[in-house]
Image (spheres, rainbow, N blue to C red):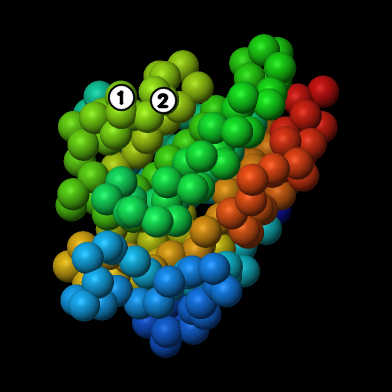
């Protein structure tokens, strides 16, 4: 049974305060904060926050997919969701998160894949327009059957991030610090597992999807 939601604005406010406090810490493999002395965009990884214990489908808001069509999160109900919040201009962590998501997809059987959707939500809505998301999907061979990419308003993005326990913060005109999390949601939109590190073999994430697909 889905639990009664806590006031979502409280969770979102907590996330915003946490992000602005600079509570993120560098991973031992991560480069430091963005510096104008570097030619490559880089950022500090932020620690994961505490997620909500109820369905993301309680969240309101209107989103747009890569085709510019309006989408409600509740439309996703009924399929397993593999979710990441990132931005397409990221040069370091986000490509590695996407690579992990593609490894997960490749490891699934046809039957498991039919029950699973891969969801990318941009934390950079000004640049990640539906047209940009469409180009990004084409560049990375993300088909429309199993992959959904969403652009939303800043408040809706913050609310979803609070629900998933994802922290993010703009650190320059071009770059964000953010948590490197892949979240598996069950068919009701509740968190079944969170992969909080970038890994080459996401074994537990794959096993969680298989268990849900049975």
Up-down relation of residue 9 to residue 54 (above or below): below
On the image, the x and y values in percent for residue 104 come to: 63, 33
Q: Residue at x 37, y 82 (%)?
A: 20
Quadrant of res 157: bottom left
On the image, the x and y values in percent for residue 16 come to: 40, 75
Disc 2 is placed on an element classified as loop
**Figure quadrant of the C terminus:** top right
Quadrant of res 116: top right
Residue 141 visible within the image? yes
Classed neighbour count for the residue bearing mark 2: other residues with Cα under 10 Å, few (<14), some (14–19), many (≥20): some
Q: Is residue 174 left or right of residue 148?
A: left
Q: Is residue 137 left or right of residue 179?
A: left
Is mark 1 in CB contact (under 8 Å) with mark 2?
Answer: yes
Q: Which residue was labeled with disc 2?
A: 142
On the image, the x and y values in percent for residue 24 come to: 49, 78
Which mark, residue 138? Answer: 1
């Amino acid at each position: 049974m889905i639990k009664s939601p806590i006031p979502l604005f409280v969770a979102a406010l907590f996330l915003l305060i946490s992000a602005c406090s600079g509570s993120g810490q560098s991973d031992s493999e991560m480069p430091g904060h963005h510096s104008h002395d570097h030619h490559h965009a880089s950022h500090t990884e932020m620690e994961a926050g505490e997620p909500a214990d109820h369905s993301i489908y309680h969240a309101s808001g209107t989103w747009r997919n890569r085709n510019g069509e309006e989408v409600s999160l509740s439309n996703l109900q009924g399929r397993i969701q593999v979710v990441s919040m990132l931005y397409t201009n990221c040069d370091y962590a986000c490509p590695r998160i996407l690579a992990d998501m593609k490894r997960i997809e490749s490891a699934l059987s046809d039957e498991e894949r039919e029950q699973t959707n891969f969801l990318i939500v941009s934390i950079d809505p000004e640049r990640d327009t539906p047209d940009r998301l469409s180009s990004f999907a084409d560049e990375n061979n993300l088909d429309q059957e199993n992959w959904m990419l969403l652009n939303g308003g800043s408040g809706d993005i913050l609310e979803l991030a609070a629900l998933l326990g994802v922290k993010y913060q703009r650190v320059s005109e071009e770059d964000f610090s953010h948590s490197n999390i892949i979240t598996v949601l069950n068919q009701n939109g509740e968190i079944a597992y969170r992969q909080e590190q970038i890994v080459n073999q996401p074994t537990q994430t794959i096993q969680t999807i298989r268990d849900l697909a049975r």
